[in-house]
Every structure is written in C-alpha cells, then in structure tokens.
Image (cartoon, rainbow, N blue to C red):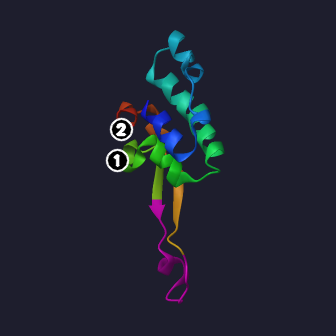
Amino acid sequence: SKINRRIEVLYDREHTIGHAYFLPLKDNPTLEQLGCIFEQKIVPLLQEYFFDDYEKIRLVLGDENKDTPYQFIIKKPVDHSDLFGKVDLEYDETAIYEINKAAFFNINSYKGI
C-alpha cells in the first residue's frame, strides 16, 4: 500500500502497518468502522512512530495532496506578528496541527491516500 511504502521511506520497513489493524472491517465493513480504525489505531501509531512529527504523518496520509476538509491532520500556519506584534524575533516557520475528526468519516479522505 502507499501508506506502507511511505512509512518505509520515512521510517523503516519493520514498522509498516499490518492487515490485523483492519480485521474488524471483515465483520463490519463500513466507513464508520474504517474511520474508527484510523482515528483510534492508525493515527496514534503514526504519532508514536514519528514522535508527533505531524509533517511526516501528513506525508504518510497524503494530506498535502488533499483539500482541507479531507485532510486527517490540518496544518494551520502561525502568524507571529498577530501574536507578538512588530517585535523583531528570529523564529523558524511554525504551524499548529489539528486532527480533523470529520475526515475520518469521509470517503474522500481515503481516496486521497
């Protein structure tokens, strides 16, 4: 799968996602079940693998190539001047990441993976 190929490139081959995570779909093949698997199992696993590096998690999930409503993790840029005024601060580009719960239950979120 694309997810596993991305994990291999960004992490290693030993941490790919096995089919066992998706076994509940055998008895309950619904979008709701898939959403629960991703929300409760897959995303937390990726958070652990990548030490909450949401840029890498977004890459694994293909979020960069999806419209915002279909992204599992939404990247929101931070406007430093809005927060701190016209203070001359040196800072790296920063963003706030938000888990988009609605995306887990939208079929288009999975098509974009």
The answer to which quarter of the image holds residue 87 is bottom right
Residue 99 in view of the camera: no
- The 10 Å Cα crowd at callout 1, few under 14, some 14 to 19, many 20 or more, is few
Indicate the amino acid at tag 2. Gly
Name which of mark 2 and mark 1 comes first in the sequence: 1
Location of the N terminus (image quadrant): top left
Q: Nearer the viewer, residue 31 or 16?
A: 16
Q: Which residue is mark 1?
A: 65
Amino acid carrying label 1: it is Asn
Which residue is located at x 49 percent, y 25 percent? 34
Q: CA distance from mark 2 to mark 1?
A: 7 Å
**Is the C-beta separation of discs 2 and 1 under 8 Å?**
yes
Nearer the observer, 103 or 1: 1
Q: Which residues are magenta?
A: 76-91
- Residue under the point 62% across and 51% down: 52
Q: Secondary structure at mark 1?
A: helix
